[in-house]
Amino acid sequence: MREVIPRQEQCRRSARTGPGTTIPEELARRSAPSSVTALLAAMLFLICLPLAAERPPSPPYYAVSDVRVVIGNGDVLELATVLIADGLIEAVGPDLEIPADARVIDGSGLTLYPGLIDGMGHLGMPAATEDDDTSGPGPGGPPAAAQPQGPEARPGTTPWLRAVDQVTDSGRFESWRQAGFTAAASVPREGFFSGQAAILALGDGDGSDLVVAADVAMGVGFEAKGGFRTFPGSLMGAISYVKQVLLDARHGITARALYEASPNGRQRPAYDRSLEPIAHALEGQMPFLLPGNFGREIDRVLELARQHDLRAMIYGGQGAYDRIEALKAAGTPVLVSLDWPEAEKDRDPDAATPLRTLVHYRLAPTTPSRLQAAGIPFAFASQGLNSPSEVFEGVRKAIEAGLAPQDALGALTLGAARIYGIDDRLGSIETGKAAHLVLATAEPWVEDVEIRAVWVDGALFLERQEDKDVEPPAGDVSGTWAMILETPRGNRDIEAVLTMGEDGKVSGELKSEEGEPSTLDKGRLSGDRLTFETTRSMGSREVQVSYSLLLAGERLEGTVSAGPMVMDFKGERTAQAAATEEDGAAEVEVSVEELRQALRQLQGPVEKMDRFAIFNARVYTLDGDTPAGIIENGTVIVADGKIEAVGESLSLPDGLPTIDAAGGSLIPGIIDAHSHITIEGGGNEGTVAVSSMVTVAEVIDPDDIAIYRALAGGVTTINVLHGSSNPIGGGNAVLKLRWGQDADGMFFVGAPPGIKFALGENPKRSRMPAGFPQRYPATRMGVMDVIRQAFTEAAAYRQAWQDYDAAKKAKKNPIPPRRDRRLEPLVEILDGERLVHAHSYRADEILQLLRLAEELGFRIATLQHVLEGYRVADEIAAHGAGASTFSDWWGYKAEAYEAIPYNAALMHERGVLVSINSDSAEEMRHLNLEAAKMMKWGGLDELEALALVTLNPAKQLQIDGRVGSIEVGKDADLVLYDGPPLSVRSVVQKTFVDGDLYFDRQADRQRQSTLEALRDKLEPKKPKDGEAAEQTGEPAAGSEPSSGGTWKHMDYSCQEDLR
Amino acid sequence: MKGCQTKLHRPVDQRIDGPPGRRSRTAMATLSLAALVVGLLLAPMAMAEGLVLEGATVHSLVAEPSVASVLIVDGIIQAVGSDLEIGSDVQRLEVSGLHVYPGFFDAFSQLGLVEISAVKATVDTSEMGRFNPHLKAITAVHPASEVIPVTRANGISQALTAPSTADDGILAGQAAVLHLAGWTVEEMAVEPSVAMVIEWPAIQTRSFDFATFTVRETPFNEAKKTAEEAQAELREWMDAARHYAKGRQAGSQRVERDLRLEAMSQILDGKLPVIIRASAKRDIEAAIAFAEEQGLRMILAGGQDAWKVKELLAEKQIPVILGLVQSLPKEEDDPYDQPYSLPGELHRAGVKIAFGSSAGGGFGPGGPHIARTLPFEVAAGISYGLPAEAALDALTRNPAEMLGLGDRLGTIEPGKIANLMVTDGDPLEVTTQVMHMVIKGQQVTTDNKHQRQYERYRARP
């Protein structure tokens, strides 16, 4: 914890040294990491002043007369009176008698709305803590090397935190109230279990006055810190951790109940303050707030909720347009983030935004209208946004995308109240409900709206008269301005980029050397006076900064004020506005249906046929029955995704669709026994030595373009493996590359589960940059020890469950052991139910692992890489392990120096079941050529070589009953080349998975032009080369940043450091 | 193996003990024979006055392939023809049914500078400091590197070895072209200094931070500013070097000798070309403009985006050393085969191309160890629009010509250095075996660390 200085104390200290010299750079930086630092450093002391002027006591009775009332339940009263008394709505209706003691507010020409509710955010919560531990080793050398903490330390787990106890400062509510927000669902920030949400009234009191409802939901997050420092370091680690805690909480309930029922003779279950609140939530006291923004993330949390029987609410939800059915079936409410995805500012103008990201930009805002149409409860969340103006921008976007305004209002009022079960007290203008009201000229999100009055719990917070002082603009301030801010600490350069509309309204932003730009608010040129405001968020509060400047030709001159602090601000125009380029870049209308159609075309099978034949092909059956394994002039008939017949020039039934292979080669679909594509959020949970609790299967990204590219290289099945940073790594996923399906649709059902092990340099962290935490093991001795220890634990765990089962049978009513996601996979290994894929290099470590496995009572399914396997081939064969190796990579690290390209052939010769794998999104595109190298190096024949990437990996993964050869009854996973399959001159023409055509070289050309045509429509026009960005600071064409995921893909392979 | 008469002592550590294993296949038998017999020959071989390769189809790259003899005297090709007069002192290598090609040229490698990529102690590619025009790769080449014979065994007879930069360095130093055989670098050197390597200060908005293992995004304008500052710095170095050269030339006593500025004079007066490494379109364009402004003879290396500026490259006659063809497309929406079709596209546009194992691209471990498979990388372009003849040119005569060595290397013509390979088929096909290598007119072994390990463990009882 860093020192917390009370506000008064800060002021005292400041006063002592005087402004300008008081604020250490460090403090300024910490308080406002994302703001115009220089400005703030100069103005920080302003926060010492009271933010709101002291107000007279407000009367408890109001009458809003002659007003149009939007009740909030769909009804509208065109001319009515609303009476407010003691914080509540006393009466609503036409012709009400106005009590004498009520202060009358004339509502004529105005509309009264229910106060808006922020459906989820962090209003009033303390600022995020800064974690110095994530920054990596500094220039000063490595910090004290500590063992990174594991899951047992309960990282980011503070479910006992209650928003109602956390409310720190209502000062921040001011700007939200001014915009019409009167209540907010607020969740403690950060963490995997961040704490319990509350509904807060955005009034003006201390915490106790603000609580509308306490403990309304349990906040859950999946944001891992990343890297190799603190568990969890990956998305899969975070998900696994959340699941383990849920299991633990569930276990706690059972254990405690059993213990309380009969404590005698039982060990007392431990108290765990992390688990108590979660257990309450599991028992139905509150739902869980689960993060799910993109479609696949929504899939994941729906599955999580199903598995763990959670009452769930999903936040984020922008990709719900693609998951309407699933959400409807699950009946899960969605708190839609209004932080709509869009191209990043100052992005690289030459980096192309992927089409699917552009499409997501376009489709995301249609989510609210789709949810509405489907009757799925939803509200709007401010989460991710800092100001109400941004929230309203988001609302407008949703309306533009089809949401009816009354439904938008519903989502911001009664809809939100219903989701949290507080519609009996908030959300509409009905007698008896809390007086949360907004009096305005239009709906609060409308651009020109004037909010005249806001009541929170009957207290009037804002009362504005019509602004009559606006003059028409006397010039145009549009353009780029080089401004100078004269601060007590010296002058600061600030660039102002302004755009003015005909009505005199001015928008734009201010930029300085450091920090993010700040956006102009309430900008207007009235006569020659330009006024605008910016909002700075400083820790938990916001500071309004007001600007008042006079326009004189090409000069602007005036002052900046924040509270009593006033500084000079002046400068000159350096560039006119970038003409009307924005108009030129106007988006071409593309119908949403057109987009969805196109996406299906780009990502999905080219063709689906129930039954068809491929003829005139050289068929490499690899089935062992055909003498040569090759059928010249062969025919393959496919029916319902399976191979129905294989033979030479088979006669075909009339009317059967056929594909003429034109003498090309047909081979079984290529199987890559070692891949890391499709893993989202990090492929290593490298923080701990044993990460068997995680599995890549829980984070598959079915939209990874690497899938399509692999299909174009003839790959139909892949073994997706965890990285190699731990002696025992995480679970695997065997996928069929059914491009276009969701993750669930890609799993190779029936493939035995697997797990990654890793030996040698990577798990012992040989090449970690200096300063990374040390982690046991650091030697090959330690690696073996970690494995032995883990299985010793696993055996004890298995025993504990056996004892429990026995005791249960004996009706002893035992307390069950705690379920352990880390040990369960290891028990499966001991039981022979999970395949071990062991990353290994040196002959000695290979042998040690084989012997250790034999001692522990299991078999290694495959040795991966196994570059020195040729030295212990007999031992590998005797153990019965498969070997999956690279074709010819060597020399990239010490343990790869003895690698030879004859490895595969030599092991094969000695009776080892060998495959060639890629470990690379690129190498996997030509595994046929990697196999061909084994004809060159080691003299395998064509069929032996081909088997290295088809039948052999199928056997290694124990899926050879389904794939790996072209045999009747097997899956129709087929690849058609235009020449011999092992020639560098042959190109894949067609790839089938389950009989569906997923890649076709001709269709690919069509796909490419469809893609480009759509891009042209969706992407704002690119500026001409060389004149990019810098003039307006707003490059027109975008870089990709979030290609549809909160997590970035990091491509890597095992041979690189630590992978 | 008739005609191979020279015998040399076999070093002890190469002795194969135990009986040979099963040898059932022709290819393997040939290989093993090569190991047993040719393997006895060390690189380079003892001095024969002359050598003649007889009976093979000669792919000279200047005439149609035909069966002919290649006569080599003192390391130089003397004659190519069918009725050559062969002196009795000439060693005869009977290669009937095989094919003779010019040895392949890796146009941008780290051969000799790296033994094990991840072991810092064995890596001599990147010196400290950002401007090192005076450093020469050849001064760090390890002639006994195991990587060299491994590479040679797949038909590569010469390579450019290039220095690289550390961190954000710009002037990496001078590259050498080496024969991949020789007891010392002096024997290996074709040219000890053949080009200046410049790492173009690119606009990089994305970088991987190894300290935190995360991808770091830099705002475009910031990245651009950084790049422009670095470019300005490079320009200052050019100006300083020009000024220095002028002063020294005029015999000014006041100009102190500066090794770095002195080294730069060779590129300023056009004696040495510059190899500028750049990959993105904007960086390639900026580099071309810079070279033109400074009057430099430019070769582009890397060139991932070169297809976007192929007309410009053709017009300015800037040759390109491409990296590994088997690479991933740059953008998600790029055609899946975009990197495969890049060489063909440049060739069709009239750009002269060569290939370098360390010039960029790929998605594997990289390093000089993959130089061995450079021919297959180039071959990968053939199905996607690169004519086979153009692929051969790119691996032979093109790099020789672009580096000013066209009169010495690249084709099988009288007067050129006899760097040749003998194969049992198309050297651009993966399954083809390289049977013999001739470097500087001497038959050198194709034996190497890998083959030795293979033989040794194959013979394990």
Image (spheres, coloured by chain):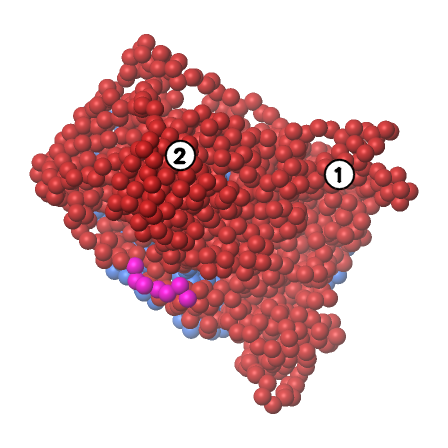
Rendering colour (chain B)? blue
Determine if the magenta segment contains residue A592: yes
Mark 1 surroundings: few (<14), some (14-19) or many (≥20) residues within 10 A:
some
Tell me residue A408's x, y (percent).
Answer: 40, 51
Are the residues flagged by discs 2 and 1 from a single subunit? yes
Residue in the foreground of this view, choosing between A1018 and B33: A1018
Percent position of residue A1042, x then y: 43, 49
How far across and how far down the image is residue A532, in percent? 22, 36
Q: Is A652 rendered above or below residue B59?
A: below
For marks 2 and 1, the one nearer the N-term is: 2
Q: Residue at x 40, y 34 (%)?
A: A85
In which image quadrant can residue B410 be found?
Answer: bottom left
A742 horizontally vs B419: left or right? right
Chain A colour in the picture? red
Q: Residue at x 47, y 49 (%)?
A: A415
Q: Which residue is mark 2?
A: A85
Using the numbered discs, state the Cα–Cα distance from disc 2 to disc 1 in whole angstroms: 49 Å
- Residue position for label 1: A254
Chain ID of residue with mark 2: A
Q: Residue at x 62, y 48 (%)?
A: A305
Q: Is residue A614 visible?
A: yes
Q: SS at mark 1?
A: helix
Magenta segment: A587-593
Q: Give the residue at x 63% y 87%.
A: A652
Residue A813 in which image quadrant: top right
Residue A678 visible in the current orientation: no
Tell me which secondary structure the magenta stretch mostly adopts.
loop
B119 sits left or right of B225 in the view? right
SS of the residue under disc 2: strand
**Amino acid under label 2?**
Ala
Callout 1 amino acid: Thr
